[in-house]
Image: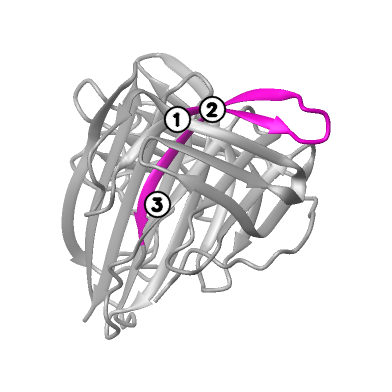
Amino acid sequence: MIAAHGQPGRGPVRRTARGAARVAFVVAAGCGGDADGAPGNPDNNQEERVAVAEPASRYLAHLMFVAPEGPAFLGVFDQSVSGGVLATDYAAWTRLGGIWQQTLGVSDTLPASRAAWRILPSQGLAVGVEGDGSLAALRTDAPGGGVRLTFLSRLGTWPSPTGQGEWLASASLEHAGEVFSGLAFFRRGAQQLDLPRSRSVARVFLLTAGEDRSIILYEGLGRAPSTGHAFFAGTETEAAEIELAGGPDQWTFSFPEIGLSGELQLDGQGRTGGTGGGPGLAALRGTVRVDADGADFAVRGLTAGLALP
């Protein structure tokens, strides 16, 4: 089972942001062209879709985005491969104008690729990739609610001790000609299919007041402590234990490694239903205090219960 918590403290770590490369959008056959209107090639910059002897595994990815102006996005990308067949179950929700709307919901089966963990283009979903094949952008095409997410510079990439890969990036969300700059958090975990599937759901908080004031909070399960990851004042900090309390509509936290504490609450009618049986997602607003000088700054955020593979 892949857990989300208990990351060991490494102390402050400095990283250099990586610039975005040229993006090629890939769409499913029959789903239209790329982001610039050119005909789409479903095999362009993607692993060849032929049946291969891939180990029976499940890959579960989550993508969260929030902008200081309030728009937010959550994508859940669930993929299982067995016997040369890949089964995908994708869903996404977007918050615009204070209202949540499901903008993606599609399931499919297809021959397994040689990289079965990659998010693939589907009906209503185009996938942008960099030259090395890594994820660079997504576009959903729901009527009236389609959005384009573009991932810009990576702020940090780190592995959890239980096998999940996570990264944080500055990003933009585009809808109906408007572009909102914000923060994207991506996580992918994996599990062998012959192991019992976890029913655990862990709440994650993504908070931002700009990329140099970005905080991720992980709620601990059971007796495990809550943990945190932050990019503040030019330094990346990972905390093996933080204080996080409250719910379902208000929370408080303390992140002693960087001397921050905060209060969070729902942002208006910012809650929507469950995600894959989880406790749902909610838009947040709050205030964070710098303990050293008592100065406050406002944050916007997103919290969601993320299932573990």
Tag 2 or tag 1, which sits nearer the N-term?
1
Instruction: Look at mark 3 in the image and give the residue it sits on.
Output: 62
Which residue lies most toward the front here? 246
Question: Which dot, 1 or 3, sits closer to the camera?
Answer: 1
Query: Does the magenta portion include 91?
Result: no
Instruction: Look at mark 2 in the image and give the residue it sits on.
Output: 286
Residue interval drawn in magenta: 284-307
What is the x, y in percent for residue 3? 45, 69
Please tell me which residue is depicted at 29% across the width and 81% down the height of the picture: 56
> Dividing the image into 4 quarters, which one contains the C terminus?
bottom left
In the rendered image, the vertical position of residue 193 relative to residue 128, given as above or below: below
What is the x, y in percent for residue 170? 60, 36
Give the camera-side residue of 296 and 77: 296
Q: Secondary structure at mark 1?
A: strand
> What's the amino acid at mark 3?
His
Give the camera-side residue of 306 and 220: 220
Is residue 155 visible in the rendered image? The answer is no
Instruction: Look at mark 1 in the image and give the residue it sits on.
Output: 265
Within-10-Å neighbours for mark 1: few <14, some 14–19, many 20+: many
Question: In the image, is 159 to the left or to the right of 275?
Answer: right
Q: Main secondary structure of the magenta part?
A: strand
Q: Secondary structure at mark 2?
A: strand
Asked whether the residues under the numbered discs 1 and 3 touch, taking CB atoms below 8 Å apart as contact, a structural biologist would say: no
CA gap, disc 1 and disc 2? 6 Å
Give the camera-side residue of 99 and 246: 246
Please tell me which residue is depicted at 50% across the width and 33% down the height of the picture: 264
Asked whether the residues under the numbered discs 1 and 2 touch, taking CB atoms below 8 Å apart as contact, a structural biologist would say: yes
Tag 2 or tag 3, which sits nearer the N-term?
3
In the rendered image, the vertical position of residue 13 relative to residue 53, given as above or below: above
Is residue 27 visible in the rendered image? The answer is yes
Within-10-Å neighbours for mark 3: few <14, some 14–19, many 20+: some
What is the x, y in percent for residue 247? 40, 42
